[in-house]
């Protein structure tokens, strides 16, 4: 069955739920600074069964990114309505949803996009896009991924020292991130973990790094207990704060996991019981190998991934 066509909904004060536009026709000016300079911000989120997941966290991060770029974007309500319109329009064309007995776990990729608009524009151009998820992401949740470490060339404190690098913003300038992914593919890997010039673990080009560390200790009553720690790199090391990592940490804490925030070095990844790249669309992708070295064991990766997936599924 062909996937439904991509849906576009422009935020436009003249249209209550946003203005639906034809994605097969040109919609942006060729002079738009988003196109000519990558000058803009965005968010990507997953809608499952028609419900956008972690929408508030994405709206909050979008507002933060926009602030860093001094872009004056519409209020959250307008975004929420446009997201609802886009998901509704997309699902109306989706045979998996409309067929008798249709499922309620269909997935839609929703992007919230902002460009500075054409040179001299009074306001940014803002729209929501709804489209089909790629097959590769779904597959990688199941099969796991092989990753290589790549130097990002900055030290882990540059974000503080050079705020104009916009390291904490989700900007449209993803050419570097995409180049790193192509480099990984050319070298037989699926994905990348960036390291800093001072040897810290940072993030993936489109994901946050997580690791699990299990420690068995005396329970004080003659038995043993296992302490389970979930660790991510320090949020102030020039990385994008992940909404998936944030939500998973909250759920994991409630389920008895201990939480930790770096600093992490490559050795910590290689010594971990499991490592994942986590993001809103692909969700948890277990890392099988880093630079050719196996992480944990297949059984441990499977068990821990199943446990964290179950926790992640409880997140709204
Ligand atoms: N880090 C980078 C650079 C990203 O591009 C992304 C998502 O695209 C993430 C982390 C993960 O963020 P989230 O979990 O909010 O999708």
Image (tube, grey):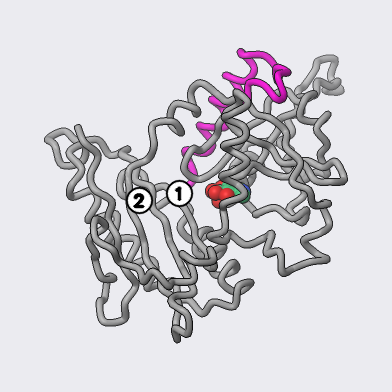
Q: Is residue 116 above or below residue 294?
A: below
Task: For mark 2, give the secondary structure.
Answer: strand
Horizontally, residue 298 falls left or right of residue 89, namely right
Of the numbered discs 1 and 2, the one sitting upstream in the chain is: 2
Q: Position of residue 13 (x, y in %)?
A: 31, 81
Q: Position of residue 82 (x, y in %)?
A: 32, 66
Horizontally, residue 168 falls left or right of residue 53, namely right
Residue under the point 49% across and 57% down: 43
Residue annotated with mark 1: 316
Task: For mark 1, give the secondary structure.
Answer: loop
Task: Kindly check if marks 1 and 2 are in contact, taking CB atoms under 8 A apart as contact.
Answer: yes
Q: Position of residue 181 (x, y in %)?
A: 58, 38
Res. 119 mark:
none
Viewer-nearest residue: 51 or 75: 75
Viewer-nearest residue: 228 or 51: 51
Res. 51 mark:
2
Q: Which residues are magenta?
A: 287-316
């Amino acid at each position: 069955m062909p996937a439904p066509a991509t849906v576009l909904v422009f935020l436009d004060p003249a249209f209550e739920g946003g203005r639906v536009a034809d994605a097969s026709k040109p919609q942006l000016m060729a002079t738009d600074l988003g196109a000519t300079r990558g000058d803009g911000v965005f968010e990507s989120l997953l809608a499952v069964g028609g419900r956008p997941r972690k929408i508030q966290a994405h709206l909050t991060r979008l507002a933060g990114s926009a602030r860093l770029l001094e872009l004056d974007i519409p209020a959250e309500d307008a975004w929420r309505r446009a997201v609802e319109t886009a998901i509704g329009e997309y699902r109306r064309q989706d045979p998996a949803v409309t067929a008798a007995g249709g499922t309620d776990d269909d997935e839609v990729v929703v992007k919230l996009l902002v460009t500075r608009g054409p040179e001299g524009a009074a306001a940014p151009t803002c729209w929501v896009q709804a489209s089909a998820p790629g097959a590769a992401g779904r597959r990688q949740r199941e099969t796991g991924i092989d990753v290589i470490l790549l130097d990002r060339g900055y030290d882990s404190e540059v974000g503080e020292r050079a705020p104009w690098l916009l390291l904490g913003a989700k900007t449209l300038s993803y050419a570097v991130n995409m180049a790193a992914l192509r480099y990984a593919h050319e070298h037989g890997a699926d994905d990348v973990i960036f390291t800093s010039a001072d040897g810290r673990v940072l993030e993936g080009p489109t994901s946050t790094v997580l690791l699990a560390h299990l420690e068995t200790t005396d329970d004080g009553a003659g038995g043993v207990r296992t302490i389970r720690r979930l660790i991510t790199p320090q949020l102030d090391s020039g990385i994008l704060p992940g909404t998936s990592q944030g939500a998973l940490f909250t759920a994991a804490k409630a389920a008895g996991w201990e939480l930790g925030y770096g600093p992490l070095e490559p050795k910590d990844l290689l010594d971990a019981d499991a490592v994942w790249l986590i993001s809103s669309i692909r969700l948890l992708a277990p890392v099988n190998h880093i630079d050719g070295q196996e992480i944990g064991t297949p059984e441990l990766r499977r068990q821990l991934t199943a446990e964290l997936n179950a926790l992640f599924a409880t997140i709204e």
